[in-house]
Amino acid sequence: MLFHVRMDVAVPPDLDPEVRADLLAREKARALELQRAGTWVHLWRVVGHYSNVSVFEVPDGTALHDLLWSLPLFPYMTIEVTALTAHPSALSENP
Ligand SMILES: O=C(O)C[C@H]1C=CC(=O)O1
């Protein structure tokens, strides 16, 4: 299943700089790992915001839920999820 996910990040400004750097490094490593595995299909920055829009390919909503909860930045993100399905007018549906 494909899911469109928006993540708005709000790391507390007073977080210890070393803790913050470690958090962001772990988040980046996990994001790269999931992209290389083909699970995190798209990752885009939202212009002007500390936010991203992403597309994930996972077996189901439970798998996405578990994945999102496992992200190091999860405690500092507001996440909005939209399930996607094929559009009948998409080229992929009209070979
Ligand atoms: O920066 C973000 O948008 C949050 C998160 C998503 C990937 C990553 O490395 O950090």
Image (spheres, rainbow, N blue to C red):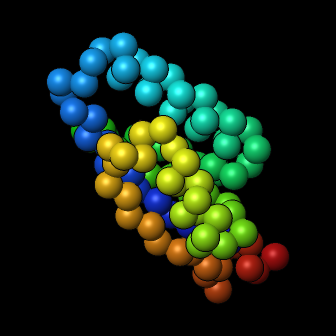
- x and y, in percent, of residue 32 in the image: 64, 33
Q: Considering only vertical position in the picture, is 88 above or below 53?
A: below
| Residue beneath the point at 67% across and 61% down | 57
| Side of 12 relative to 87 (left or right) | left
Compared with residue 3, is residue 94 higher up or lower down, i.e. above or below?
below
Q: Position of residue 71 (x, y in %)?
A: 51, 44
Find the residue positioned furthest to the top: 18
Q: Is residue 46 visible?
A: no
Find the residue positioned furthest to the bottom: 88
Q: Is residue 47 visible?
A: yes
Q: Quadrant of residue 9?
A: top left
| 4 over 48 or under it: above or below | below
Split into 4 quadrants, where in the image is the N terminus? bottom right
Residue at x 21%, y 33% (from the top left corner): 12
Numbered-mark total: 0
Residue sitting at x 59%, y 72%: 61
Q: Where does the C terminus fall, quadrant-wise?
A: bottom right
> Which of 68 and 5 lies nearest the eye of the viewer?
68
| Residue most extreme to the right | 95
Residue at image point 74% right, 48% down:
38
The x and y percentages for residue 3 are 56, 66
**Image coords of residue 69 (percent x, y):** 50, 53
Q: Is residue 73 left or right of residue 56?
A: left
Q: Quadrant of residue 22?
A: top left
Position of 60 with respect to 45 (left or right) is: right
Vertical arrangement, residue 4 with respect to residue 72, above or below: below
